[in-house]
Image (tube, helix red, strand yellow):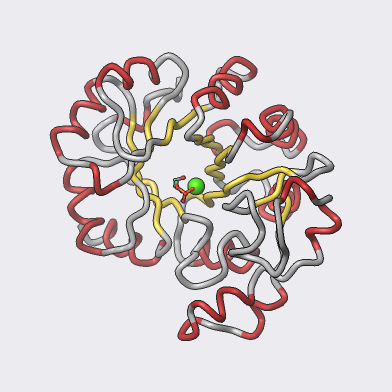
């Protein structure tokens, strides 16, 4: 029984590459994910939106402007139309000190491309974004998980939407689910989350040691977002978090190994 196993005392701290190694390469691109794995990340974090033709794609925003040269909403384009966009040049403009010419060739990836490339041995931490806007998003995700035979112990599914997680829990109760929160849920909310999820993903700056202990005493695990600073990582690990989302998986690896 893998549920709650992560909340036991001596398990490893999960190094979750937030949008890939997104401090070093444009988020959610192939180069960002590859870099994350090279740097020792345990999980690739993937934000999902859905195209007009029902293809799940890895992109954080429901709109294209911030991370591509496209305009408007992901849901108004087919996957083939999005595939031609440049998903890397924005990064070079925003972070000139990290810029690389090769980033300009990066494109939006479908979840299917990611599974096909990295395979079933990899670990994935997948977020359903704006699920209220996307018909069949959860079914489409579960279909791909089946098609690529991703083992349930290699998969964590996260969402700010309780409705989305509940719908996944009903369809496939063996999957481990994480309810995200903009800050931190109350004890009453934690008890409700326990009915469908295995852990919570609160914002790191809302946490303290007592709260983390309270979550563990309810049998849930806790992965905090998003932590890029060495000192903050050390403190949260000392307080007992079970995993951290980070744009800098190399920094987190170093902190975990030398704590
Ligand atoms: O999924 C954890 C964290 O990524 C939530 O915030 O906005 O980066 O998806 P966001
Ligand atoms: Ca996310």
| Front residue (pair 186, 71) | 71
Which quarter shows the N terminus? top left
- In the picture as drawn, the residue positioned furthest to the front comes out as 72
> In which quarter of the view is residue 85 placed?
bottom right
Quadrant for the C terminus in the image: bottom left
| Figure disc tally | 0
Above or below: residue 218 compared with residue 133: above
- Which residue is found at the position 38% from the left and 46% from the top? 14
The part of the image, by quadrant, that contains residue 182 is top left
Say left or right for 259 vs 128: left
Q: Position of residue 78 (x, y in %)?
A: 84, 50
Q: Which residue is pictured at 59% across the width and 84% down the height?
A: 100
Query: Residue reaching furthest left?
Result: 210
Query: Residue 213, image x and y in percent?
Result: 18, 30
Along the line of sight, the residue nearer the viewer: 145 or 1:
145
Percent of width and height locating residue 202: 34, 39
Q: Camera-side residue: 248 or 26?
A: 26
At 60% from the left edge and 74% from the top edge, which residue is drawn? 90
Residue 32 rendering spot, x and y as whole percentages: 57, 65
User: From what the image shows, is residue 34 above or below residue 219?
Assistant: below
- The structure residue drawn at horizontal position 65% and vertical position 64%, both measured from the top left corner, is 30
Give the image quarter of residue 108.
bottom right
157 with respect to 12 (left or right): right
Closer to the camera, 158 or 217? 158
């Amino acid at each position: 029984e893998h549920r709650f196993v992560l909340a036991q005392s001596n398990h490893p701290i999960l190094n979750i590459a937030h949008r890939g190694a997104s401090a070093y390469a444009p988020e959610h691109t192939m180069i960002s994910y590859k870099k994350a794995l090279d740097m020792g990340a345990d999980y690739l974090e993937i934000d999902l939106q859905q195209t007009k033709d029902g293809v799940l794609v890895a992109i954080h925003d429901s709109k294209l402007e911030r991370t591509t040269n496209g305009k408007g909403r992901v849901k108004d384009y087919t996957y083939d139309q999005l595939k031609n966009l440049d998903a890397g040049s924005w990064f070079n403009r925003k972070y000139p000190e990290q810029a690389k010419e090769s980033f300009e060739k990066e494109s939006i990836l479908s979840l299917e491309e990611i599974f096909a490339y990295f395979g079933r041995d990899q670990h994935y931490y997948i977020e359903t974004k704006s699920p209220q806007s996307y018909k069949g998003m959860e079914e489409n995700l579960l279909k791909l998980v089946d098609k690529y035979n991703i083992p349930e112990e290699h998969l964590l599914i996260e969402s700010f939407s309780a409705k989305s997680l509940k719908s996944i829990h009903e369809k496939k109760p063996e999957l481990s689910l994480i309810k995200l929160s903009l800050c931190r849920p109350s004890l009453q909310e934690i008890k409700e989350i326990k009915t469908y999820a295995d852990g919570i993903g609160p914002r790191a700056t809302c946490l303290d040691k007592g709260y983390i202990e309270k979550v563990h005493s309810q049998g849930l695990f806790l992965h905090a977002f998003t932590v890029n600073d060495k000192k903050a990582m050390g403190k949260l690990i000392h307080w007992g978090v079970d995993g951290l989302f980070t744009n800098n998986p190399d920094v987190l690896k170093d902190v975990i190994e030398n704590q």
